[in-house]
Amino acid sequence: MPSVLIAGLGYVGQPTAGLFAANGWDVEGWSRQSSSYPGIRTAAVDISNAAALKRDRAFDVVIQCASTRGGDVDDYRRVYLQGARNLRIAFPSALMIFVSSTSVYAQADGGWVNENSPASPLRETGKVLRLAEDLVLESGGIVARLAGIHGPARSFLLRSFLTGTQLQNEDRYVNQVHRDDIVNALFLLATDRAIRAAGSIFNIVDDEPILRGECYRWLTQKLGPQPAGPERVEATRKRSDSNKRVSNARLRGVGWTPRFPTFASAMERSILPSFELAQR
């Protein structure tokens, strides 16, 4: 039975662990706080603390999807960079998949970028991600660069719209991906070793980048206009300095097909129903 360690049982990590378990994998999940999930062995482990890592067993695959939950650069160094270093040392024979971000692309001209495009982030947090990526790539691992995550009960744009938050720049592209499509992509990257011939970096993003203003116009047509609220402070958003369209052609080329290929499909079939259910 193949085995996988999910280092980070959050919004993405928990359903990823569940998918592996449902497909007959031996699954262990780590998070900083003790938790339990059906069919998954769990442990409270801080991956930034090398001495705390359990090394009493080996894994075929290690997926690092722990999150800083919007932390600062020191949190990034601790969770992403030190965490990746510790996991690599603890499990040198495992295929490591590092969950990164498309925010490492700093392009601002609205053009298309792919895995071969320069990834030279301007923010210090993005630079830390790149260091962690390089560490994983140098040891033969895979880097999965995620676009902005939305899914059941989670959408930054929808919450902003519902609270009347005003957009400062409607003509900037946003790149998004549904949580369930991320889960399926990570499972594919872990289980199909032939994928390695296609490359070691994969963008996980839906098919159609969309202008933020178009997102709001679509929501207005669907839900009606909302009362005006406060203007957003752009400087707090890690992706706010860039403007690009991220391609998923490489991942699609190895067999991944998103269930939610567009903003509209994700909203209509998953996100809006989950928000309506949560408000009942």
Image (cartoon, rainbow, N blue to C red):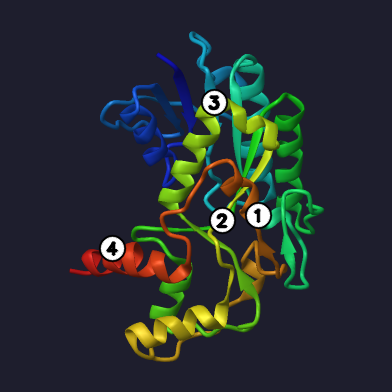
- The amino acid sitting under disc 4 is Ser
Structural crowding at the residue carrying mark 1, measured as other residues with C-alpha within 10 Å and reported as few (<14), some (14–19) or many (≥20): many
Measured as percent of width and height from the top left, residue 12 is found at 44, 45
Left or right, 116 with respect to 226, comes to right
Q: Are marks 3 and 1 in contact (CB under 8 Å)?
A: no
Identify the residue at image location x=43%, y=59%: 260
Q: CA distance from mark 1 to mark 2?
A: 9 Å
- Tell me the mark number nearer the camera, choosing from 2 and 4: 2
Q: Are marks 2 and 4 in contact (CB under 8 Å)?
A: no
Q: Is residue 54 above or below residue 11?
A: above
- The amino acid sitting under disc 1 is Thr
Structural crowding at the residue carrying mark 4, measured as other residues with C-alpha within 10 Å and reported as few (<14), some (14–19) or many (≥20): some
- The amino acid sitting under disc 3 is Val
Q: CA distance from mark 2 to mark 4?
A: 21 Å
Identify the residue at image location x=44%, y=91%: 228
What is the quadrant of residue 123 in the picture?
bottom right
Q: Which residue is under mark 4?
A: 274
- Residue 49, can we see it? no
Structural crowding at the residue carrying mark 2, measured as other residues with C-alpha within 10 Å and reported as few (<14), some (14–19) or many (≥20): many
Q: Which residue is under mark 2?
A: 205
Q: CA distance from mark 3 to mark 1?
A: 21 Å
Q: Earlier in the sequence, mark 3 or mark 4?
A: 3
Q: Which residue is under mark 1?
A: 102
Q: Which residue is under mark 3?
A: 62
- The amino acid sitting under disc 2 is Val
Q: Are marks 1 and 2 in contact (CB under 8 Å)?
A: yes
